[in-house]
Image (cartoon, rainbow, N blue to C red):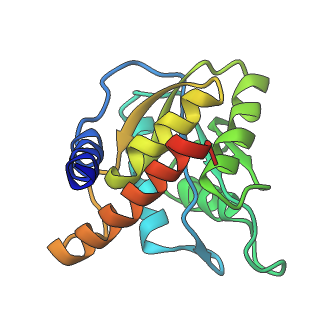
Amino acid sequence: MLFVVIGYSALSIYLYGNTPSKVPADAAIVLGAAAWGDNPSPVFRERINHGITLYKRNDIQRLIFTGGKGDSSEPAEAIVAKRYAIAQGVDAEDILTETKSRTTRQNLYYASQVAATHQLRRILIVSDPLHMKRAVLMARDLGIDAYPSPTPTTRYRSFKSQMSFLARETYFYFVYQLFRI
C-alpha cells in the first residue's frame, strides 16, 4: 500500500510539473537555485530565462527574483539574476528582488512580502518541473494566489537524473505535507 501511495504521489508531482498555467498574472516569482560568483548556476539560468520569456511575451509585468548569499563575499542570487535579466533586455524598473532567503519556503515568504508591497496579486511560480507541485503548495499556504509556470528546459534530462530528482522531491513533498516545513 505504501508503494502505491508513493508511486501515486511521484506520478502526480511529475504530471503537475508538466502542466503550465495559462492564467494572466501580475508577476512571476523566480525561485533561486545558486549563483556561482557573478553567474547563475545552469539550473538558475534556466529559471531566469523562463521568467524573461514570460516577461517578453507580456504574460507578466514584473519579475521577482529570489535568493540570498551563499558566501558573504559573493552577490546574492537575486542580484545575479537581476543583472542577467537586465543584460537580456528586461527593464530594471520591472525587476524586484528579495535577498534574504536560503530555502524554497523562505524564497516564497520574502517574495510574497515584496509582491504585497507592490500590490502584485496573481503570481506565476517559476521553477523546475519536478519542484513545481511543492513550490506552488508552499506559496498557496503562504497566502499567495500562485500558479505553476515550470521551466520548459531542465538539467534533469536523463532518466537517471529525473528519477533521482523525482525521488528527492517526492520525499520533500511528503515531509512538507506532514509537517509544513
Residue 6 image offset from top left, x and y in percent: 28, 52
**In the displayed structure, would residue 129 be above or below residue 34?**
above
Q: Is residue 1 left or right of residue 78?
A: left
- Residue at figure coordinates x 69%, y 29% from the top left: 115
Q: Name the image quarter holding residue 81.
A: bottom right
Residue 92 image offset from top left, x and y in percent: 66, 44
Between 25 and 127, the residue placed more toward the observer is 127
**In the displayed structure, would residue 41 be above or below residue 51?**
below
Q: Name the image quarter holding residue 18.
A: top left
Q: Is residue 101 left or right of residue 129?
A: right
Q: Residue furthest right?
A: 72
Residue 62 image offset from top left, x and y in percent: 58, 33
Residue 33 image offset from top left, x and y in percent: 54, 64
Q: Is residue 171 left or right of residue 111?
A: left
Q: Is residue 24 visible?
A: yes
Q: Is residue 19 left or right of residue 114?
A: left
Q: Residue furthest left?
A: 159
- In this rendering, the count of numbered labels is 0
Q: Is residue 46 visible?
A: no
- Residue at figure coordinates x 45%, y 49% from the top left: 174
- Residue at figure coordinates x 39%, y 41% from the top left: 133
Between 176 and 97, the residue placed more toward the observer is 176
Q: Name the image quarter holding residue 180.
A: top right
Between 38 and 104, the residue placed more toward the observer is 104
- Residue at figure coordinates x 60%, y 52% from the top left: 104
